[in-house]
Image (tube, rainbow, N blue to C red):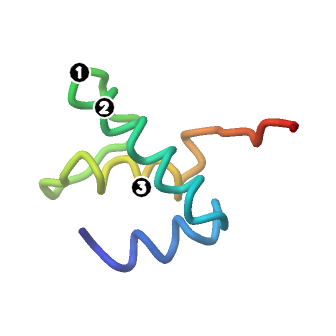
Amino acid sequence: MRDDYIKAAQKVITDPNMLINVVSHRVKQLKRGNRPLVESLEKLSSEEIALREIIEGKISFELAEG
């Protein structure tokens, strides 16, 4: 996985646990056949696609109020 994608995604979702949860949830969706929300000329893994979607603001998330 590309370090530059991880670092950029951490600027969007600063909580590491939340970032892991959002990425893993999106990877499951992609592997089930959901279409990527970003385009790329290079071959990206599902994890890299999920990170790019976070970086580009294509995925939203919210923290649960406890």
Residue at screen point 48% across, 77% down: 7
Res 65 → quadrant: top right
Horizontal side of 6 relative to 59 (left or right) equals left
Q: Mark 1–mark 2 contact, CB under 8 Å?
A: yes
Horizontal side of 6 relative to 16 (left or right) equals left
Give the labeled residue for mark 2.
28
- What residue type is disc 3 on? Arg
Question: In this orientation, which residue lies closer to the viewer: 19 or 66?
Answer: 66
Residue at screen point 30% across, 22% down: 34
| Neighbours of disc 3 within 10 Å: few (<14), some (14-19), many (20+) | many
* Residue situated furthest right in the rendering: 66
* Secondary structure category for the residue under label 3: helix
- What residue type is disc 1 on? Arg
The Cα–Cα distance between marks 3 and 2, rounded to whole angstroms, is 15 Å
Q: Earlier in the sequence, mark 3 or mark 1?
A: 1
User: Is residue 62 placed above or below 4 in the rendered structure?
Assistant: above
Which quarter of the rendered picture does the N terminus lie within? bottom left
* Residue situated furthest left in the rendering: 43
The Cα–Cα distance between marks 1 and 2, rounded to whole angstroms, is 6 Å
- What residue type is disc 2 on? Lys
Res 16 → quadrant: bottom right
Give the labeled residue for mark 3.
52
Residue at screen point 22% across, 20% down: 33
Q: Nearer the viewer, mark 3 or mark 1?
A: 1
**Label drawn at residue 32:** 1
User: Is residue 39 placed above or below 18 in the rendered structure?
Assistant: above
